[in-house]
Image (tube, rainbow, N blue to C red):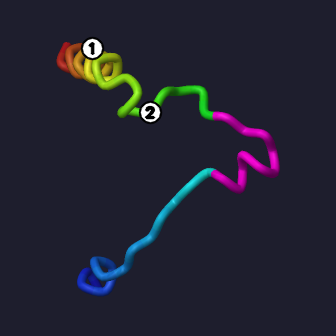
Amino acid sequence: MMQLAAYQVELVTSAKVHCLLGWTPRHTSFAEAPTRHYLAWKAARAASAR
C-alpha cells in the first residue's frame, strides 16, 4: 500500500477556490516569511513546554 502511495504524484492548488469564490489566504507562505514562521514555531514550542 505504501509503495502505491509513493508512486503517486499529485499537485494540490487553491486555484479553483480563488476563481470561484475570490478566496485569498490570510497567512503568508513559509517561503515569503521564513523568519516569521520560525519565530512562531519557536514560541509555540516554548509555550507547550511549560
Q: Residue most toward the front?
A: 32
In this figure, which residue is indicated by the disc labeled 1?
43
In this picture, is 18 found above or below 16? above
In this picture, is 6 found above or below 37? below
In this picture, is 27 found above or below 7? above
Task: Tell me the SS state at disc 1.
Answer: helix
The numbered mark, 2 or 1, whose residue comes first in the sequence reads: 2
- Compare residues 6 and 29 and report the one nearer the observer: 29
> Residue sitting at 61 percent across and 33 percent down?
25
> Residue sitting at 39 percent across and 74 percent down?
9
| x then y, percent, for residue 22 | 78, 40
- Compare residues 48 and 9 and report the one nearer the observer: 9
Q: Quadrant of the N terminus?
A: bottom left
In this figure, which residue is indicated by the disc labeled 2?
29
Q: Is residue 31 left or right of residue 45?
A: right
Instruction: Tell me if residue 44 is in the magenta stretch.
Output: no
Task: Tell me the SS state at disc 2.
Answer: loop
Q: Residues within 10 Å of mark 2 (few under 14, many from 20)?
A: few
Q: Which residues are magenta?
A: 15-24
Dominant secondary structure, magenta: helix
| x then y, percent, for residue 46 | 20, 15
Picture quadrant of residue 47:
top left
| x then y, percent, for residue 4 | 31, 86
Query: Label 2 sits on what residue type?
Result: Ser
